[in-house]
Amino acid sequence: MFVLWAVATVTFFAVRLIPGDPAEAILGGPGSQTSPEALAAVRAEYGLDQPLLVQYLQQLGRLATGDLGRSYALNMDVGPLVLSQLGGTLLLAVLSLTVAWLIALLLATWSTGRGRLAAQIGSGLEIVAAALPHFWLATTLIVVFSVWAGVLPPISTADARGLVLPVATLAIPLAGFLGQVMRESLAAALESPFVLSARARGESESGVLWRHALRHAALPAISLSGWAFGSLISGAVVVETIFARPGLGRTLLNAVTVRDVPVVVGVVMVVALAYILMTVLTDLASRLADPRPTANGNGALS
Amino acid sequence: MSELEIQASATGRSPGGPSGRVGRLRIGRLRVTVVELAAVLVALLLLTAAVAPRLLAPGDPLAIDPLAAFGAPSWAHWFGTDESGRDIYTRVIDGAGDSLLIGLTATVIGLVLGAVLGTVAGTLGAAVDFTVNRFLEVLFAFPGLLLALLFILVFGPGPGSAIVAVGLSTAPGYARIIRAQLLRVRSAAFVEAATVQGLGRRRILTRHILPNTLAPLLVLGTLGVGQAIVWAAALSYLGLGAQPPAAEWGAMLSAGRTYITSSWWMSFFPGLFIVLTAVCATALGRAIEKRMRHA
């Protein structure tokens, strides 16, 4: 709650720093010939003639009731606009997170316990994958799979085939990050006493890996997933633009480009809310996955 | 303990002797892996390109040759040519300076801001720590590029504001790490020893705590440059940073986007160099980290 209020405050005052008259922006930018009467009418309509503090309180009040205001450029309310775009972006982010987890798990478990060459290949792949920028990966995938092979559409269509390339673009770098973290903690877990005792009990090597070590290894990666979700949303800005896919990211970029302030504020608020929810969820998930007893009541991660 | 040793003991095999390892070289007294050596070489190459581009690519990056437009990679044009017949290889090499400078400046801005915030939080008492922490939490609620986009909304697009925007959005992460490190160092045995010796608060802070806190900055900075370059290029790509025809890598990629179906090389090679730089920065950061831990 606090964070949401602070986000609203920061964005409100940041937006006030923008040079130029917002009323002019609504009427089509500084270049347009606007009459003083039209300006005054717009100021009254959007409440811009009130003192700053009143505007701020009004804004907070509107936000509290879920009213995100009206877009300057699109002539529609921000709330419905953001809601209509939210689904596509959430689908993209959740799918990418799942795929990234699968790839990272496969890579980490495959390359662990197979000698050092496998480990080096694995960590090399992860470093390179983590360094791939979305915009480049996306264009390269388009060239290979759409232009040369012609198997997947370069523009994201509504069906499942159109989702493959955007999801791959978002998932591959993320899998690199998660895989690095998972490999390190997996290696550490395999060194720990409880693994030794499992081995001493005659547990098979794969049993040790899957039943004992992996749970520990997954913990840091789970707590990273909140951050990962945030990075996916910001990655969605790039990916949705490239694949011409409707969504929050593209809406945000368009709004920033034409300085459509209410839309930017609305998208930022929704993203912040989603991010906070996701952080809470990952906290819960890591407590569920943590096999250690919670003696001090909070199962603190080391 | 290195990853290799963990591997070896985890699988129950004995680790080979230091000289018998795959992928390790010795240069004088310094032992390096092949990957580290490659990273250093690439870094030197990129730095050469940044400082003296004419050494690697003698041509003019802006020279147009309409007859050779949209040329595929060939002996004459290694990376092909763009829509005006400009040589992509020359432009990529020429763009190294701008791209690296943008990445470095943004990282320095992020590190300095982060260091100041982190140090303030870690030294000025619980109330300040609480305030700064809440502030950081708020900044973390703008994930990734969102903070940068908000900054650009306020100050308008352009290379300058892209740099500051990227620096600003990396600062919270640095601040958090530096604060954690500061708290760890403050409770270390050698700080206690200095307190017992009766040294003044200020002296302990400046002579003992701060140097040990700020040492990891080198690692953070090296790892961060790659990230900063990628983000700055992303902003340029979205048309909010450096603008074409500037030979900045992100802007080149952006320009090549229009011709993606016919001339893939226009966006492939500038992007390849971004990836190369980022991988190289990560490898170098890891190498420095490893050596500092052993030292």
Image (cartoon, coloured by chain):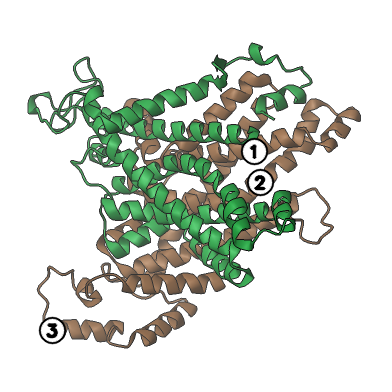
Judging depth in this view, the residue of B160 and A143 nearest the camera is B160
**In terms of sequence position, does the residue under pointer 1 or pointer 2 come before the other?**
1
Q: Is residue A185 above or below residue A262?
A: above
What hue represents chain B? green
Asked whether the residues under the numbered discs 1 and 2 touch, taking CB atoms below 8 Å apart as contact, a structural biologist would say: yes
Amino acid type at image mark 3: Pro
x then y, percent, for residue B16: 70, 14
SS assignment at label 3:
helix
In the picture, the disc for residue A36 is 3
What's the distance in space between the residues labelled 1 and 3, CA to CA?
62 Å
Disc 2: host chain: A
- Disc 2/disc 3 C-alpha distance (Å): 59 Å
Q: Residue B103: x, y in percent?
A: 37, 43
**Residue occupying the point 76% across, 17% down:** B14
Q: Residues within 10 Å of mark 3 (few under 14, many from 20)?
A: few
In the rendered image, the residue lying farthest to the front is: B198
Foreground: B184 or A226?
A: B184
Q: Is residue A18 above or below residue A191?
A: below
| Chain letter tied to brown | A
Q: Nearer the viewer, mark 2 or mark 3?
A: 2
The mark that comes first in sequence, 2 or 3, is 3
Q: Give the amino acid at mark 2.
A: Pro
Residue sticking out furthest to the top: B20
Q: Residue furthest right?
A: A201
Residue A290 point in image, percent of width and height: 76, 49
- Residue B144 in view in this figure: no
Of all chains, the one bearing label 3 is A
| Residue at x 38% of width, y 42% of height | B229
Report which residue position mark 1 lands on: A182
Point 40% across, 84% down: residue: A58
Q: Are marks 1 and 2 on the same chain?
A: yes
